Amino acid sequence: MLRFFSASNGIVNSRKAIEECIEKALAGEDLQRCRLILIHSSIAHDFSQILSRAAELCPQAILAGCTCAGVIGVEGANESMKALGIMAALSDDPEEIVVSYCDNIREDDSFETSRLMAQELKALNPKVNMVHVLASGMDIAADRAIEGIESVFGPQVTIFGGTSSDNMKALTSFQFINQKILERGAVFVGFADPTLSAHTGAHHGNTPIGIPFVVTKSEKNRVIEIDGQPAWPYLMQTLGLPVSTHPGQTIPIAGLAELLPDELHDAYDNQHVLRVIVKVDDEHQSFYMPVDCPAGTRLWLTKRDEQLIFDGLTRMLGKLTRQIEDKEVVGVFHTDCGARGRTLFNKILKEEFIHLMQYPIIGDKNTAWLGMYGFGEFTPLGGRNFFHNYTTCICALCRDKQSS
């Protein structure tokens, strides 16, 4: 039976930061029984020091994680250049947690690479029923990755997690597995504790504006033409920006919306799902979506609606708390879009926002909570695995109270 513990801090010295996180999270626990340490780190930490010291303190633990634009814990949000957060899992059964990884995942091979990684998880433990995904935020075709995992475990597997990011520059990001530091990789963590159930919620707060563009030429997730014109120049002209603009600069203002299937509107409290652009081709003519975007797709520019963000989060949390009201929450995995951090809210509003999402789920308890500001979010929607952008996504792992 898995038990979860978390901690976060903004200590500048990387070795001291991970020491403090582990000591705080696992105070009074046997570190030899720690089977997993999930690590979220902002971009300026010394990752090799973090990983080596974590291995010294918890030699039986799998180390996995990624970079992000900030971390979120029960301590609150921290978007400093040296923020660090961990989720540790303890168990007497080492097979309850298994891991696979790749050091290079790309748009074209996301399905096959994810399928092979899922097969590796299943070979290690066929009872895996949840997969936590951490992957390159600028290279993966997320929908194809979901299909790859489901091709092995079936659509009933719960897929949650996020894509790694930097400090909102969209220049590079990193993933961690034990002592390896990857730049364009992916890490899958499989959970096989039959006493756990996953309960999820996702919400964004943007509304479409104007008339939609139409994708007139594309290749999988590469958008080549919009309304018959080169896609990136067309979009930049619409936004009043030079074609040389790096996509990272457009993240806060260029969220693109596409229509959701009708049956998902109620579950999402919205008719549209948002997509972020973090990659363009070398000639600055086409851009890449995180999912396939076939010709004929309509895309809207959007604007953020602060009231909708707060109201929508309240409604989403209402649905989630009704799901878990008779259960014990044992750990919360939280992925949030980097644009919903400091680029959207000032410090006071952000603290209010974090409190608004945490209190209904864990109250005043010191329940393990690990969140990150990333480039994208894996969280089920309407009973199916789904990839999001610009959202707050919550995955609460719960146990029946009589089993706790």
Image (spheres, rainbow, N blue to C red):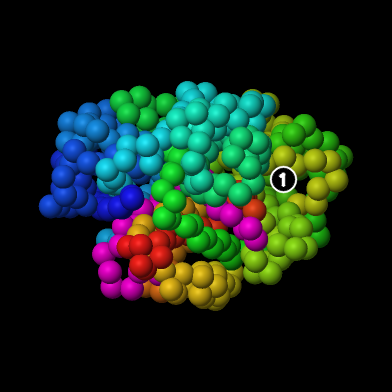
Does the rendering let one see residue 80? no
Q: SS for tag 1?
A: helix
Question: Seen in the image, is 139 located left or right of residue 69?
Answer: right
Residue 30 seen in the figure: yes
Q: Which amino acid does label 1 sit on?
A: Leu
Which residue is found at the position 49% from the left and 41% from the top? 127
Q: Residue at x 68, y 69 (%)?
A: 266
**Residue 311, located in which quarter of the rendered image?**
bottom right
Q: Position of residue 363 (x, y in %)?
A: 33, 73
- Residue that appears at 37% across and 37% down: 95
Please state if 255 lies on the left or on the right of 218 as rendered. left
- Judging by the rendered image, the residue that carries numbered circle 1 is 235
Q: Which of 13 and 372 is in front in this view?
A: 372
Total labels drawn: 1
Q: Inspect the magenta stretch and tell me whether residue 35 lies in it.
A: no
Figure check: 6 above or below 58: below
Residue stretch rendered in magenta on the structure: 361-383
Depicted 155 relative to depicted 61: above or below: below
> Is 382 a magenta residue?
yes
Tell me where residue 148 appears, x and y as whole percent: 63, 34
Q: Vertical placement of 30 versus 125: above or below? A: below
Q: In this view, does 289 lie to the left or right of 135?
A: right
- Identify the residue at the far left of this view: 28
Quadrant housing the C terminus: bottom left
Which percent across, then down, holds residue 380? 59, 54
Q: Residues within 10 Å of mark 1 (few under 14, many from 20)?
A: many
Residue 272 position by quadrant: bottom right
Q: Where is residue 142 in the image (x, y as percent from the top left)?
A: 61, 40
Identified at 54% across, 63% down, the residue is: 201
